[in-house]
Image: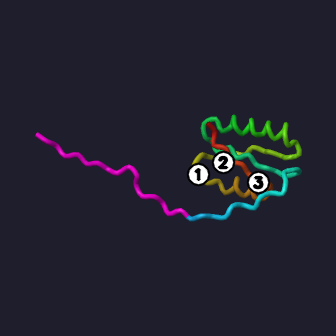
Amino acid sequence: MSQRIAVHDPRGFAPKVTGKQLAPRLEGFDGKTVYLVDCLFDNSEVFMRELQDWFGKNLPAVKTPIIKPRESWVDDPGMRAKVVAEGDAAILGVGL
């Protein structure tokens, strides 16, 4: 006796991608604030602290506060507004 099975294509449908212009490059980092954004992935906090230590040793004139969104995978408008208002750049960290 044979049975039929349904097979679904796991690829789904690719979203439409719209390109955006990159942010302008900073002239230099001295005196700037570069937010280190811990995106709450596994080990991303460790990576952000190591990056902060690297900046402290190699570019001590750069302020590197670590900031986190309220939850992972959810937009945090308050955090974004703070980075825009108080920062000159941001690095997003996703961990290992």
Residue 62 coordinates in the image, percent (x, y)? 85, 46
**Is there a contact, CB below 8 Å, between mark 1 and mark 2?**
yes
Residue 44 in magenta?
no
Q: Residues within 10 Å of mark 1 (few under 14, many from 20)?
A: few
Which of labels 3 and 1 is toward the front? 3
Residue 29 marker: none
Q: Which residues are magenta?
A: 1-17
Tell me if 40 is positioned left or right of 59 in this view. Answer: left
Residue shown at the point (68%, 37%) measured from the top left: 45
State which quarter of the image contains the N terminus. Answer: top left
Residue 69 marker: 2
Which residue in the protein does label 1 denote? 74
Instruction: Tell me the amino acid under the disc marked 3.
Output: Ala
Q: CA distance from mark 2 to mark 3?
A: 16 Å
First along the sequence among labels 1 and 2: 2
Up/down of 3 relative to 17, above or below? above
Residue shown at the point (75%, 43%) measured from the top left: 66
Residue shown at the point (84%, 46%) measured from the top left: 63
Residue 35 coordinates in the image, percent (x, y)? 76, 49
Q: CA distance from mark 1 to mark 2?
A: 8 Å
Which residue in the protein does label 3 denote? 89
Q: Nearer the viewer, residue 63 or 54?
A: 54
